[in-house]
Image: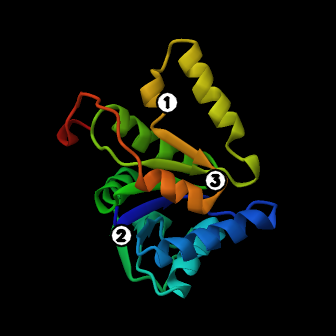
Amino acid sequence: MTSIVVFCGSSEGYQECHRETAYGLGNMLAERGYRVVYGGAKIGLMGAVADGALDKGGDVIGVIPHFLRTKEVTHEGLTELILTNTMHERKLKMHELSDGVITLPGGWGTMEEMFEMLTWGQLGLHQKPMGMLNINGYYDSLKVLADTMVSEGFLKQEIRDMLLFSDSIEELLDLMENYVAPDVPQWVTKRTT
């Protein structure tokens, strides 16, 4: 991995640990030499990740659609800012620029971005490690849901195991760096998504 896309909220949430951990993630990604790709905003957890990486001299690429540029208050200090026409183009560009995915706490948009990338992995469109930074137990319920999907027969264990969880930045990056993707057939091609 040389480049990691980070999906997270444009809000900071109610607890300071979310912002502090997001900033720490940016720091750690830069220290380990990873380029950060994210949604391009200077606010919320998004801004904290970008600032954390930039403050350590890291490269940060923001990808934002034209119509969100003013609503999300675009970060002006990035290494590069890429503008897209649609949300789908945004996700595709982030996918193209990254070798791994980390998801921090966020709302519907964060979940949608992560689940689409996870589905693309299940369909064999990529073999990138996908990590959930489980700050303050935020994703505990998602872990339970994923395990229930397996126990109820709606998800194979090897597909469930594509989603890596940790509450530690260092441990999550170690898991991602040692990740071996399951051998899944490619059901569709990039042209059909």
Q: Residue at x 64, y 35 (%)?
A: 142
Q: What numbered label is drawn on residue 147?
A: none
Q: Amino acid at mark 2?
A: Leu
Q: Residue at x 51, y 83 (%)?
A: 54
**Residue 166 in the image: x percent, y percent?**
62, 49
Q: Kindly check if marks 3 and 1 are in contact, taking CB atoms under 8 A apart as contact.
A: no
Q: Nearer the viewer, residue 107 or 16?
A: 16
Q: Secondary structure at mark 2?
A: strand
Quadrant of res 10: bottom right
Q: Secondary structure at mark 1?
A: helix
Q: Residues within 10 Å of mark 1 (few under 14, many from 20)?
A: some
Q: Amino acid at mark 3?
A: Gly
Q: Kindly check if marks 2 and 3 are in contact, taking CB atoms under 8 A apart as contact.
A: no
Q: What numbered label is drawn on residue 160?
A: 1
Which one is earlier in the sequence, the residue at label 2 or at label 1?
A: 2
Q: Where does label 3 land, which residue?
A: 106
Q: Nearer the viewer, mark 2 or mark 1?
A: 1
Q: Amino acid at mark 1?
A: Arg
Along the horizontal axis of the image, is 70 left or right of 16?
A: left
Q: Quadrant of the C terminus?
A: top left
Along the horizontal axis of the image, is 180 left or right of 130?
A: left
Q: Nearer the viewer, residue 188 or 130?
A: 130
Q: Residues within 10 Å of mark 2 (few under 14, many from 20)?
A: some
Give the Cα distance between marks 2 and 1.
33 Å
Q: Nearer the viewer, mark 3 or mark 1?
A: 1
Q: Where does label 2 land, which residue?
A: 83
Extreme top residue here?
Answer: 153
Along the horizontal axis of the image, is 184 left or right of 102?
A: left
